[in-house]
Amino acid sequence: ERRLRLLGVRAGSLQKRAGALEYERNTAQAIDTYASVAIDTGAGTTRLF
């Protein structure tokens, strides 16, 4: 029973980690989109980076 509980804990932390990675990827995509929109708006004259 103890091993089962350990497996459950490990599975839970893996899921949490996967969720965090997914969140980071989505955030990065949102920033990329915002950056390209801002550059388009500035007609290529203003660069964010």
Image: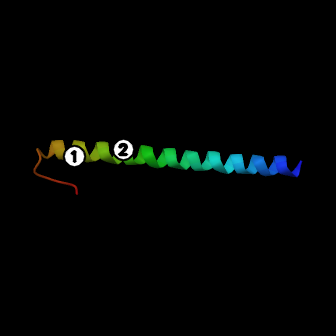
Residue at (36%, 44%) from the top-left corner?
A: 30
**In the picture provided, is 41 more to the left or to the right than 17?**
left
Residue 12, horizontal then vertical, whole percent: 69, 47
Residue at (70%, 46%) from the top-left corner?
A: 11
* Residue sitting nearer the eye, 17 or 35: 17
Total number of numbered labels?
2
Residue at (51%, 48%) from the top-left corner?
A: 21
Residue 9, horizontal then vertical, whole percent: 74, 50
- Which color mode does the image show? rainbow
Label at residue 30: 2
Cα–Cα span, label 2 and label 1: 12 Å
For label 2, the SS is helix
Residue designated by label 1: 38
For label 1, the SS is helix
Kindly indicate the quadrant of the structure image that contains residue 33. top left
Q: Disc 2, disc 1: CB below 8 Å?
A: no
| Crowding at mark 1 (Cα within 10 Å: few <14, some 14-19, many 20+) | some
| Crowding at mark 2 (Cα within 10 Å: few <14, some 14-19, many 20+) | few
**In the picture provided, is 17 more to the left or to the right than 5?**
left
* Residue sitting nearer the eye, 11 or 41: 11
- Give the residue type that dot 1 points to: Ala
Residue at (64%, 48%) from the top-left corner?
A: 14
